[in-house]
Image (cartoon, rainbow, N blue to C red):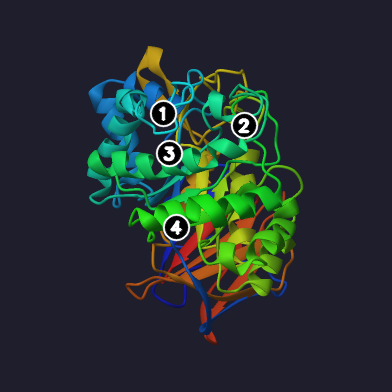
Amino acid sequence: MTPRHPCRVFLTARDGDFRLTELAALPAAGAPPPALVAVDTGRSYQTLLGFGGAFTEAAAVTWLQLSANRQEELLRACFDRREGHGYTLCRVPMGSCDFALGNYAHVETPDDYELASFTIARDRQAILPFIRAAQRVAGQPLQLLASPWSPPAWMKTSGQMNRGGGLRPECRAAWASCYVRFIQAYAAEGVPIWGVSVQNEPLAAQPWDSCLYTAEEERDFVRDHLGPALESAGLGDVKLLIWDHNRDLMVARARTVYGDPAAARFVWGMGFHWYGEDHFDHVAEVHAAWPDKHLVFTEGCQEGGPHGGSWDLGERYARSLINDLNRWTEGWIDWNLALDTEGGPNHTGNLCSAPLLIDPARDTFHRQSSYYYLGHFARFLRPGARRVACDTGDASLEATAFRNPDGTLAVVLLNRTAAARDFRLVVDGADIATAALPPRAITTYLL
């Protein structure tokens, strides 16, 4: 059935060859009255920062194994505004993480409190070339969030980067200065840092690079060291994010840090991940209690290997995207931009999936379902877009809608069930289309 209003329709579905495919229209709805999908552009909410992924060392070194033509193709798939997803908001580890080729820090020399040995030489090998190439394809600097997994081993109570441990009290000032030096060093390479988080997953003592902070320790480090260090270096415009961990305890962490006005004044907002139970309600609760603070999803991936060809991957992404965006989240950052077909490399064997899986031996890469599902948001919901009210009359039909800066309206509909879902799309009281969304499918209407 032809839509009743001029619009473009894009479909990705498990069955058939639909992969961000533009159609004249979706299949016609059946005889029963379809579920109402109602959009009210008169009710608006948060402004969108954008979408993207992480420039890990694993992604960078694997990308470098491709031929020049394939490297460019992968960059376009992620960062080109016309041919790809047009990513603008990304993440970079500050030092090593599990998806590095081994432990490394920017200040390896023990007791170097003055940071005389500070260097980003390791970053220059793969990560920075990857970022600069992405910026070239994007046609602009990216908004980069820098996140540390661990301070240098000598700064920690455990004396090692892996398996948790804490930041030694006498090292807090030097560690805060490392953030400043990192931001300045990247800027000198033509790669500006948009924001920093205090610590990746501060309550997880992982077998890989990790460091533990209680809520009170994170609050005090921000208030007494990191916030003042950024401010005194003239970097007060760099966004400072707390938590950077799962949704389950984000309310409690916000209460402790935001409850201290001296700490809260340095904090722009909160980052969060999706591991564990969903707890989407906690995202909304943080916004309701602290509406002046911002929310960014900063990491999510499918654990336990590459999961090549899995359709569930894309649906997990889309479900999180819709639920997070509908609860005031302003940006959504995937984990590794790409990995190899084994789900690595990873220096502790924590293999995972990524939207793009690279096969260097065949000089190619494979687009996973998560790549296509992400595209239904990143390609059509652009930075500066405002979320508008969007409600569905069918609980199995999930949806969100945004008004873009150019005036276009993007409505994303998700069907994770095994049956087609009939719907009637109405925008500001006007009928747009009556159609059926195929089973295990996602569509974007662009009006």
Q: 376 left or right of 126?
A: right
Q: Of callouts 3 and 1, which one flags the residue occurring earlier in the amino acid sequence? A: 1
Q: In the rendered view, would you say 354 is above or below 246?
A: above
| Residue receiving disc 2 | 210
Q: Cα distance, mark 1 to mark 4?
A: 21 Å
Q: Nearer the viewer, residue 64 or 442?
A: 64
Which mark is on residue 178?
3
Q: In the rendered view, would you say 345 is above or below 3?
A: above
Q: Residue at x 52, y 39 (%)?
A: 335
Q: Of callouts 3 and 2, which one flags the residue occurring earlier in the amino acid sequence? A: 3
Q: Residue at x 49, y 61 (%)?
A: 444
Crowding at mark 3 (Cα within 10 Å: few <14, some 14-19, many 20+): many
| Residue receiving disc 1 | 106
Callout 1–callout 4 Cβ contact below 8 Å: no
Q: Which residue sits furthest top?
A: 361
Callout 3–callout 1 Cβ contact below 8 Å: yes
Q: Nearer the viewer, residue 426 or 118?
A: 118
The residue type indicated by label 1 comes to His
The residue type indicated by label 4 comes to Lys
Q: Residue 403, can we see it? A: yes
Q: Residue at x 60, y 18 (%)?
A: 348
| Residue receiving disc 4 | 239
The residue type indicated by label 2 comes to Ser
Crowding at mark 2 (Cα within 10 Å: few <14, some 14-19, many 20+): many
| SS under mark 4 | strand
The residue type indicated by label 3 comes to Cys
Callout 1–callout 2 Cβ contact below 8 Å: no
